[in-house]
């Protein structure tokens, strides 16, 4: 009986020892999982990416080292005066499929953590520099971004005054007010969350731009240009205004209409008033110049009807002639009220 009792005690001890060992293993496993998830460099970066996926701008900028202070931007070699106008939740692309693909440690102790994700369905990747900033109870490390996770986009709007991103219209002169109000092209620096694929554009009554893509990368300056080009409505409006100018020229009952691109010299005596009509209007084709839209010389035809008397024999004839002429536009600008101001070349 004593032997049976002793055996039962040994078996009980073994069982409880096994349970204790399993609990200890589970505890260490849980501790390791918590450390990897919340207290590792890769976990820190994954947490940042999740805030972007949730469009929680305040949480993203509140993570250690993420706030775009002037000192942080200067340290990363980025413009310290970049606008924060694009750091908005409604402008963030849809971030999904986040995964950490590598975590490499430099000799300095800084971790380079690379992540891959999708931005509005397009594959993107980024490498973040992360460093330890302290610890919890001396065993669980805390982390911060060693360099800013943001990017600076230098955005140029060529031949227009603003650009669109998502449903938002942005005027670069608000971010860089030293630009002239009538500047033909404008530009400014903007902070943007990275990684991300942002699509910029421009659409207005007279201008349209093909999509311009910004691929944001941490601690980098990326440059993009929104290239606005004339729409058919712009060409039609310039054509209409040029035609009206030529029609006005044709009302002048002289051989050389003042300030106009056509006219003739006649050696014989003119009887009565010459009459002009525009037989063929020059076809408008505008292109971007240095400070405004311009048009190279285009050819038109003006018809002259006039009675002349020969100085040689006194005969009188009715002259009907088509006179070719060339006209250019040295400047075409869009006024703030949407009307056009054209300057005809002489």
Image (cartoon, rainbow, N blue to C red):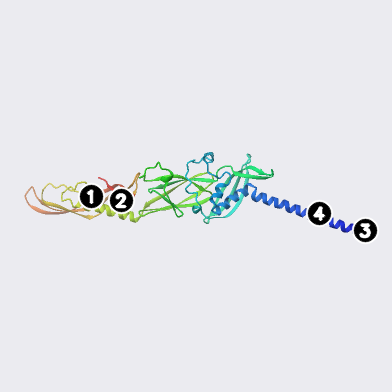
Q: CA distance from mark 3 to mark 4?
A: 22 Å
Residue, x 78% and y 54% (percent of image)? 20
Circle 2 sits on which residue? 340
Marks 3 and 2, the one that precedes in the sequence: 3
Q: Disc number at residue 325?
A: 1
Q: Is residue 270 left or right of residue 138?
A: left
Q: CA distance from mark 2 to mark 1?
A: 24 Å
Q: Where the C terminus falls, by quadrant?
A: top left
Residue, x 89% and y 58% (percent of image)? 7
| Direction left: furthest residue | 313
Residue 132, x across and y down, in percent: 63, 42
Does the residue at mark 2 contact the one at mark 1 (Cβ under 8 Å)?
A: no
SS category of the residue bearing label 1? strand
Marks 1 and 3, the one that precedes in the sequence: 3
Q: Nearer the viewer, residue 135 or 227?
A: 135
Circle 3 sits on which residue? 2
Circle 4 sits on which residue? 17
Q: CA distance from mark 1 to mark 4?
A: 106 Å
């Amino acid at each position: 009986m004593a032997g049976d009792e002793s055996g039962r005690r040994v078996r009980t001890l073994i069982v409880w020892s096994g349970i204790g060992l399993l609990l200890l293993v589970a505890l260490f496993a849980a501790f390791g999982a918590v450390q990897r998830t919340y207290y590792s460099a890769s976990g820190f970066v994954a947490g940042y990416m999740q805030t972007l996926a949730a469009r929680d701008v305040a949480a993203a900028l509140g993570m250690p080292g993420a706030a775009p202070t002037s000192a942080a931007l200067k340290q990363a070699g980025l413009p310290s005066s970049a606008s924060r106008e694009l750091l908005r939740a409604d402008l963030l692309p849809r971030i999904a499929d986040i995964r950490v693909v590598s975590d490499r440690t430099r000799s300095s102790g800084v971790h380079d953590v690379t992540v891959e994700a999708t931005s509005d369905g397009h594959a993107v990747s980024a490498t973040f520099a992360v460093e330890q900033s302290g610890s919890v109870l001396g065993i669980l490390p805390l982390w911060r971004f060693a360099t800013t996770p943001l990017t600076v986009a230098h955005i140029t709007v060529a031949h227009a005054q603003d650009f669109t991103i998502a449903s938002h219209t942005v005027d670069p002169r608000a971010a860089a007010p030293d630009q002239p109000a009538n500047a033909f092209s404008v530009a400014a620096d903007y902070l943007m969350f990275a990684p991300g694929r942002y699509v910029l554009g421009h659409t207005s009554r007279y201008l349209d731009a093909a999509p311009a893509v910004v691929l944001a990368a941490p601690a980098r300056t990326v440059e993009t240009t929104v290239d606005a080009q004339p729409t058919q409505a712009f060409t039609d409006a310039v054509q209409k205004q040029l035609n009206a100018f030529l029609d006005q020229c044709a009302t002048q009952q002289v051989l050389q209409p003042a300030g106009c691109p056509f006219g003739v010299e006649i050696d014989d005596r003119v009887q009565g008033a010459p009459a002009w009509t525009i037989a063929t209007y020059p076809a408008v084709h505008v292109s971007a110049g240095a400070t405004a839209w311009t048009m190279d010389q285009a050819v038109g035809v003006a018809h002259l009807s006039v009675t002349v008397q020969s100085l040689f024999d006194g005969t009188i004839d009715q002259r009907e002639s088509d006179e070719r002429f060339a006209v250019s536009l040295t400047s075409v600008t869009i006024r703030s009220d949407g009307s056009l101001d054209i300057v005809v070349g002489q």
